[in-house]
Amino acid sequence: MVISVPRLVIAAPSSGSGKTTVATGLMAAFASRGLAVSPHKVGPDYIDPGYHALATGRVGRNLDAYLCGTELIAPLFAHGARGCDLAVVEGVMGLYDGAAGEGELASTAQVAKLLRAPVVLVVDASSQSRSVAALVHGFASWDPEVRVSGVILNKVGSSRHEEMLREALDESGVPVLGCLRRAAQVDTPARHLGLVPVAERRSDAVDAVGAMAEQVRRGCDLDALYALARGAGELSGAAWDAAEVVASSPPPPLPVPSLGAAAPRPPHRPERPRPQTPDGLRVVAVAGGAAFTFSYAEHAELLTAAGAEVVTFDPLRDEQLPDGTHGLVIGGGFPEVYAPELSANEPLRKAVAELAFGGAPVAAECAGLLYLSRELDGQPMCGVLDVSARMSERLTLGYRDAVAVSDSALAVAGTRMRGHEFHRTVVEPGAGAAPAWGVRAPERRVEGFVQQGVHASYLHTHWASQPGVARRFVERCRTS
C-alpha cells in the first residue's frame, strides 16, 4: 500500500513560538476551502487535538514515537488521514526536542522524517530582525534529513519589521510562506497544565479558532503551502486498523475472580445485575465532559474492535452510569478544577463505587485515579481507593518506562509499556498493596493500585502499543 496524502509538519525553534495558532489556523483555513483535513499532534498532548478537531470537524490524533514506537507512526498517521485531501501535523516543543536523554526520539524532527513530510518553521520574530536568518539557517542545516521547506513569521510588529525580516531571510534560501502580526484575539487561556480544553470553553474556543483561521488566511500563502504539502514523499505500508491488531494480539489469559488486593465491600452497597447487551456486547462507559477531556481516539476504537459498545458519560451531569455498563474507563483531565461539582454528584459517585466493588473492570488514568480516591482537596470522591488526593506546587512531567507489577484487568504482571506523567497533584499513599506499575525513571519506584477489577495510576498509556490491553479488558467485562 502506498500512502500519498499531502502533508505538512508545523514546527518551531521552541515552545511558545505560535505552533498551535498557526497549525490550528491552517487546518481551519484549508477546511473552509472544502478540503478534508486530517489533524495530528506530535507527542502526548491531549489539549491541542481538541482545538484541531474543532478546526477540521475530524478527530484530532497523536503521533508519539515514544509511547507507540517509531514503527507505528506512519500506520497511525495513515489511519487518521485515510480519505483526506491534506494532513497538518503540529509539532511539540522545539523541532529537535524529544524524550529527555533519548536523542531525537519522539521529537518533531523524527516524526517528520518518518512521515517524509516537509517542515514549516514558525518563528517568533517579535525581538529580532536580521538574526532570524541565522536562526532559520541553523535549524534547516542541523539535520539534512529534515526538510525545513518554509518559514512563517509570527508576532511581526509592523510593515517595516516585516520588510527587514524578509530581506534577511532572502539570504537563507528558505522561503517565507506567511507573516502574522500580533493579534491578542487568537490567544487562548491557560492554567497549571497548559491551555484550557475546548470542552470547557466551547463557544469561546469556536471564536478563537475562527480568529486563527482568519489571521492565517490574511497572512499566509495557502496555495504555496498546499503545493508544498503535495510534494511530500510517498509512504509505503498499511494503515493501522483496530480490528486487525486486536484480532492478531495474543488471547488474554482467563481472568481470576479477584485481581490484586481486595477492598472491603460496604454492606449498604448491594450488587446490582449488569444486563447483557445484544449479541454478547458489553457496554464500556468512558468518562467525558469538561472534567475528563484527556483520551486517545484509538482507545475507543480498540475497545469497539474487541467487542465492546463504547458509551460516553459526563460525571459532572449524569447521575447514573450508562445502562448495561460492565466496564469503566476514566481517563485524564481536570477533576481538581471541578472537585466541588464532582463531589456534589453523589448518585454517580455511589454508582461508580458499586460497579468497582462488584468486581467490574475499571481503568483509571491520572484524573481517573483522583476521582476514585476517598477525597480530592477535601471534597468526597468515589471512595473506591482508600487514598487522599490534593493539589501540589510541584509539576510531575515526563515519559516513563513501566512494567506491570500485578495481574490486572489490563495486563498480566511483567507486561512492559511506556507511559507519560503530567500532573500537579499527589495521592497518599502513592501505591497500594498490589501496585499497578514499576517505573524506572526518573527514579525506581512502584505506583498505582490494582484492586479487584480496578487498575488506577498516574501513568497515561497509549493502547495502540499494546492492543492486547483492550482485548483483555473487554474479556474481563464478559466474565466479571
Image (tube, rainbow, N blue to C red):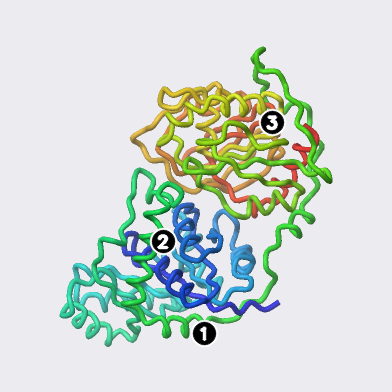
Label 1 to label 3: alpha-carbon separation:
50 Å
Give the mark toward the camera: 3 or 2: 3
Between disc 3 and disc 2, whose residue precedes? 2
- Viewer-nearest of discs 1 and 2: 1
Which mark is drawn over residue 4? none
- On the image, numbered disc 2 is attached to which residue? 97
Residue at the image point whose x is 72% and y is 38% from the top: 412
Q: Is mark 2 on a helix, strand or loop?
A: loop
Q: Mark 1 points at which residue?
A: 231
On the picture, is 210 further left or further right than 354?
Answer: left
Amino acid type, mark 2: Asp
Side (left or right) of 276 relative to 384 = right
Q: In this view, does 85 lie above or below 436?
A: below
In percent of the image, x 68 and y 21: which residue is there?
262
Quarter of the view holding residue 94: bottom left
In the rendered image, the quadrant that contains the N terminus is bottom right
Q: Amino acid type of disc 1?
A: Gly
Residue that sits furthest to the left in the current view: 160
Q: Where is residue 413 drawn, in percent x and y?
A: 69, 37
Viewer-proximal residue, 353 or 316? 316
> In what element is the residue under mark 3?
loop
Q: Are marks 3 and 2 in contact (CB under 8 Å)?
A: no
> What whole-number distance in Å separates the C-alpha atoms at marks 1 and 2?
25 Å
Please tell me how crowded label 3 is: few (under 14), some (14-19), or many (20+) other residues with Cα within 10 Å.
many
* Type of amino acid at the residue the image marks with label 3: Gly
| Mark 3, residue position | 453
Q: Give x and y (percent) for residue 376.
A: 45, 27
